[in-house]
Amino acid sequence: MLRRRTLLQGALAGAVLSGCTSEPVAPPVSKENPFSVDGNAPVDLVVSEEYGGFAAAAYRKKYAAAVVTPKVTAQLSDQLLPRFAAGNPPDVVLSTGDDKLKVGRLVKEGQLTDLQQLLDAPSWDNPDTAVKDQLLPDMLDFGSYDGAQRTVNYIASVYGIWYSASLFQRNGWEVPRTWPDLLALGADMKAAGLGPFMYAGTHPYYLLELVLTLAAKTGGPDVVRRIDNLDEGAWKDENVTKAITAVGELTKRGLLAPGTADFDHIGSQKRLLASKVGMLPCGNWLENEMKGLIPQDFALTMFAVPALDSSPALASGLHVAATAPVLVPDKAKNKAGGLEYLRALLSADVAAQVTSESAQLTIVRGAADGLEMGSALSSARDLLASAGDQLITWYFDDWYPEFATAAAAATGQFMAGGLQQSEWTARIQAAADKLKQDNAVTKYHRD
């Protein structure tokens, strides 16, 4: 079984100095130059989003002779796979979007550099602090394969429940602290002629996400860790049962907005923005996805999934997923420059610029503190800050996407009345057991 986690790998490798006078001598390793970067060498940078190139200015300021011109393209696989195959890949890649690289495939082919040396290096901001110590907890596991850090996933996606703060204020509604509070609020919304709760019915993963967050807040991180590891009976855990039962109360009490099962993510979000719906679960990318459609006085805001009761295992628990992997190909011509570029990208100043200009949070701890931003992003930032180390993470949806799709579909059926709770549990547990026994599927493990 492969083990997918971060392993510390000791000190940085020393620079190899050439004994030939005709060859340029590599700069010595230091806190300021931990990878022995040749300041005259260009950095070949290909990114799928403009913000991936934001560290170029910091790099050029330090290495004035270096040429760093980010190439932005949405056609990553089409353009880069031939370069990987030919042995001349870029020095740095940011991979997002519909044509993103299949990282797992590149890992199996030995195409990606182990980035542990980057994480152990002195940070760009403080030479006495390692890069990894400036990052949010548990976010690095998203890019770790078989004990090696193959990518650093740069964007921190915060999940929660969206609402209109101005609508709440006009009606005297308070943000619910517990799940019973949420159900009571839903009843008030229904009495006011509003569809209390909605999710993207054609994409029921959003609903499964809500169930798992609620289960983890109730029972602690082991609940989702056992699910990731395909442990026996993980989906039968009493905390998972409590969570799916609690979410099912939305259906039983008639608190789902009419037509919920038929709306996709855009349609459901439009209903929220039209004040036809009171609450909607989604990640903090919603603001960017609906840019231009958010009413000026709407005050789009997120609150954390409330716990089942007043004594949860993770009182501040928040589901956060690290996305947008950045990587350095193993056969990069300027691998040292690629590592150094990522060190700059993970600096507080660059991360703050990314947040300011792209309305996204990064995994750099505290980089968004004090920035001026709208209610949507600021609410996600504040939830992330309040969560501290109580970040809820799971990986099975990335490791086993077909299984995750089946689990989400079963959750949608349950909410539509097509499955009883016991049938939901049995179906997903059976699928997990079948997956565990399938030797054709590579298995992963988390500690």
Image (cartoon, helix red, strand yellow):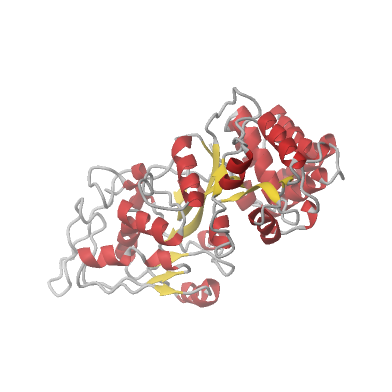
Is residue 2 at all visible to an observer of this figure?
no
Residue farthest to the left, as pictured? 21
Eyeballing the image, is 136 above or below 98? above
Whole-percent x and y of residue 383?
A: 49, 40
Eyeballing the image, is 97 above or below 176? below
Given residues 90 and 13, the one toward you in this image is 90
Given residues 33 and 10, the one toward you in this image is 33
Which quadrant of the view contains residue 21?
bottom left
* Residue at image location 61% in from the left, 46% down from the top: 167
Is residue 417 at all visible to an observer of this figure?
yes
Which quadrant of the view contains residue 255?
top right
Going by the image, does 253 lie left or right of 317? right
Given residues 256 and 318, the one toward you in this image is 256
Q: Quadrant of the N terminus?
A: top right
* Residue at image location 26% in from the left, 50% down from the top: 125
* Residue at image location 31% in from the left, 72% down from the top: 68
Going by the image, does 340 lie left or right of 189? left
Given residues 345 and 207, the one toward you in this image is 207
Whole-percent x and y of residue 130?
A: 30, 44
Residue farthest to the front, as pictured? 170
Whole-percent x and y of residue 72?
A: 44, 73
Q: How many labels, in total?
A: 0
Going by the image, does 197 lie left or right of 305? right
